[in-house]
Image (tube, helix red, strand yellow):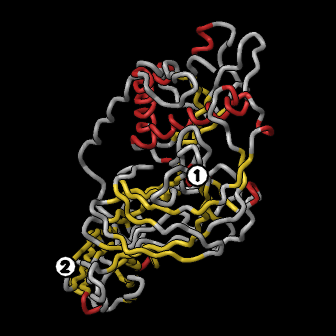
Amino acid sequence: MKGYRTFSLLIGLVFLAECMWSQALPGNTGDPNNPELVNPSFEDIARASLPPKGWIDCGFPNESPPDVQPSGAWEVYRPAYHGYTYLGMVTRENDTWEAVGQHLNHPLLKGHCYTFSIYLCSSSEYWSAVAPDSVVNREMLPDDLPKKNFDQAIKLRIWGGDGYCDKKELLAESPTIQNTNWQKYSWKIEPKRDISHIVLEAFFKTPTLFPYNGNILIDHASNFSMVSCVDGEELIIPPSVRILQPIEKINPRLNRVKINAVVRNIKSKTQIKFRVNSAFIDVFDFDPNTGAFSTNLSLKEGKNTIWLYARNEEGEAQDETQVYIIERGSTAEETSPPPTEEPPVKPKKSEYKVLKSLNDGKQVATGQIIQIENLYFPADSSNLSNKSSYEVLDELFHYLEEHPQVTIEVRGHTSGGTRGQPINMKFSEELSRARAKSVALYLVRKGIPADRIQYKGYGPSQPIASNENAEGRRK
């Protein structure tokens, strides 16, 4: 399959929270001292070559993604340790390996220590077809490809970085996993830099002379729990305070409200101060195990300032909000009053020089397809290298930044051969999928959330240009 191919994009407006997993941004939810993974038990529909919800494929562009097991595919039937499914990853004799990654809801902080654990084992059966390296043998049909058992023992490596699939720092690695029953593996991790993203990677035992076919099964990951870096020493962390919004309305007629908050790293109510306007109040409920704080109040008409403060041996923290009572019996309004200044001028949207169809000002419709010009790949490759390709992808990135409600599916296509020339359908489909994945990863690594982008390879089954002339085959 020679020449270059282009891509089409399926753009749809989708409410993400209703149809797919979304990942929390740092500081939005949970305990900042105990960063959590999305879907740590790798629960999903058991299937081959598609990572579980909440995880993005970080493997090689021309290779298949990890599996959700036990799917029966590759003869893997071991029950999950926790829940119903788990992650299966492999290494290959062609010196490639599988990996998945995601964005942490809170970063791992430089100079702090964390405990982390996960359950691992190996499967004695993990059969898969192996595509030959030579171009001539790529013409073999999928059923004719040789099958090999990926049954060798490998290890898990845990990386941290600044973006999706970024491997800046090796945080931990397991021994070579020989056990075929689930076992728990634990580490104390001390990052040398702040870590916002995590990668779980299958890798060969080291040292080794030659790459080989192996597998590892992964289940039931823990949170990253902050601990003292000195063994036996109690960890004391500065407190954190957050008043939860919206303020709960109990009896609007009497202006009764309930204040809920989260106060962490505090052992006793005596370490907390709570004030409404100028009056300190010591009647409130507090659970030091969960950090849950709550109290009921009757507020005065007009502006009410709610202030919450906590202090321990390592520091102090506070939060403040305002509740406005317009008149007796009215509804309480949280936070600041409506601004009196003029609203800011909405910035002018980008003018697209390549994706000109996005300049008409019309809102894209669900299912709308936009063919991207000037996006090319070298023959039989999924590597982006052409300057014009980066220009058009940067325009697409800016469009997605300006339209956060838009999700896309990247569709990859290859030529269907000319003059009845036979083609390898499997290789064509894998190549088109790898190219679509390259586009998706480029956008994700620039900052578009992974749950807004899907990708799929169609091979030559849905040509977008004629294969009978050079110009059509170039697209």
Q: Tag on residue 48?
A: none
Circles 2 and 1 in contact, beta carbons < 8 Å = no
Residue drawn at x 46%, y 47% is 449
Which x, y percent locates residue 129?
A: 72, 45
324 is higher (above) or lower (below) than 276: above
Q: Amino acid at mark 1?
A: Tyr
Please identify the quadrant where the N terminus is shown.
top right
Instruction: Classify 209 as above or below 132.
Output: below
Element on which disc 2 rests: strand
- Report whether 3 appears left or right of 234: right
Q: In x, y percent, where is residue 94?
A: 57, 43
Residue 306 visible, this angle: yes
Q: How many badges with numbers are in the image?
A: 2
Label 2 is placed on what type of residue? Gly
Q: Nearer the viewer, mark 2 or mark 1?
A: 1
Of residues 264 and 141, which is closer to you in this image? 141
For mark 1, give the secondary structure: loop
Q: Residue furthest top?
A: 469
Label 2 vs 1, first from the N-terminus: 1
Q: Toward which corner of the image does residue 54 lie, by quadrant? A: bottom right
Is 240 on the left-hand or right-hand side of 25? left
Instruction: Examine the rendered structure and indicate whether residue 143 appears above or below residue 134.
Output: below
User: Is residue 23 or residue 183 the one in the foreground?
Assistant: 183
The residue positioned 79% from the left and 37% from the top of the image is 144
Which residue has dot 1 on it? 212
Q: Is residue 18 visible?
A: no
The CA distance from mark 2 to mark 1 is: 52 Å
Disc 2 packing (10 Å; few <14; some 14–19; many ≥20): few
Q: Mark 1 Cα within 10 Å, few/some/many (few <14, many 20+)? A: many
Q: Report the residue marked by disc 2.
A: 315
Q: Please identify the quadrant where the C terminus is shown.
A: top right
- Decide if residue 197 is on the left or right side of residue 451: left
